[in-house]
Amino acid sequence: MRLYEAKVADVLRLTQRDEVFLQDVENQMHTFFKLMGAKNYHKMRKIIPRVANVWYYVMTSLANLQTLGEEYTGTIRVDQDGHIPSKMVQTLWLILYIGGEPLLERLLSSSKNKISKSTALREEAKSFLLRCIDFIKERKSTVARIHQSIFYTNGKYYNLSNRLMGIRYVLLRQWLQDDTFTGSFNLLGHISLFYILFNFIHQLLFNHDRNVSENFPVSLSTSNRTCVLCAENMKSPCATTCGHVFCWTCIYESLSYQKSCPVCRENISSSRIIFLQNYT
């Protein structure tokens, strides 16, 4: 059977469909745990999105069934060989999709702790390795944005977990293929990628020059005044309930299509955004 490559618009439509259903599931779970009391709800509310995602994809992808979004767009998942991914691959994908970021955080924290306590490494090596770990921690969002830009250029892998496991989407029928905005998405991806890399190199050079002039060790970190969404100095900074700070317009635009924090994915609403008047 001949299959057809899903375009960017196809993948975006299927993920939006899945996200709408998952949001409804999460809202119902929030309501259920609120009935169990404020103390129990406070303990459970942070893991509700993960529980909802695990339930949804175990019942669909891991059972070799289409998700609602995939059924809606007429797409299926395939591996690099064009076959249906095995349950092992699907399980690893789900682990990376749900817990990839927390696992990375634990790995980096554990590595940092071991390096700090190591007696076999010289102080210069320790300092370099610790700076590298801090650099990776601070640049997670940049990596995610670079990946998103690459997705817009070719439309193959929507999530980092898809790219790591080699899972992509294909269409069952050619007439289902939505190629309307492929050129626009491609242009957007190249512009976005150039902009991200330009700002990344500029910030590294700026920090290097500033630290050298002040006779401090070279630091790979960037200013905490930089918004992770637009990669520029914050304008009208505001904080979410989970403690992350963004530009006022950036976070409101992000919440218009996804009701979760761009950094930690905790559910937030625009009415709970706090404007920071004296943020430094």
Image: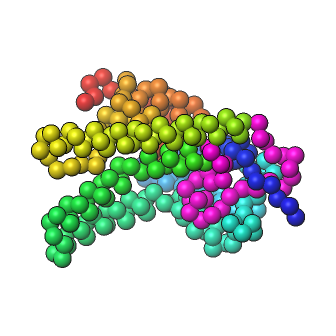
Magenta span of residues = 152-180
Please report the residue visible at 69 percent of the width from the left and 66 percent of the height from the top.
79
**The C terminus appears in which quarter of the rendering?**
top left
Q: Nearer the viewer, residue 58 or 34?
A: 58
Kindly tell me whether residue 31 is visible in this rendering.
Answer: no
Residue 130 placement (x, y as % from top left): 25, 60
The answer to whether 82 is drawn above or below residue 140 in the figure is: below
Residue 128 placement (x, y as % from top left): 23, 60
The number of discs equals 0
Magenta run includes residue 33: no
Please report the residue visible at 20 percent of the width from the left and 66 percent of the height from the top.
125
Residue 220 placement (x, y as % from top left): 28, 49
The answer to whether 273 is drawn above or below residue 21 in the figure is: above
Looking at the image, the residue that sits furthest to the left is 215
Please report the residue visible at 28 percent of the width from the left and 28 percent of the height from the top.
279
The answer to whether 74 is drawn above or below residue 180 in the figure is: below
250 relative to 22 in the view: left or right: left
37 relative to 88 in the view: left or right: left
Magenta run includes residue 171: yes
Please report the residue visible at 20 percent of the width from the left and 65 percent of the height from the top.
126
Q: Nearer the viewer, residue 59 or 251?
A: 251
44 relative to 257 in the view: left or right: left
Kindly tell me whether residue 83 is visible in this rendering.
Answer: yes
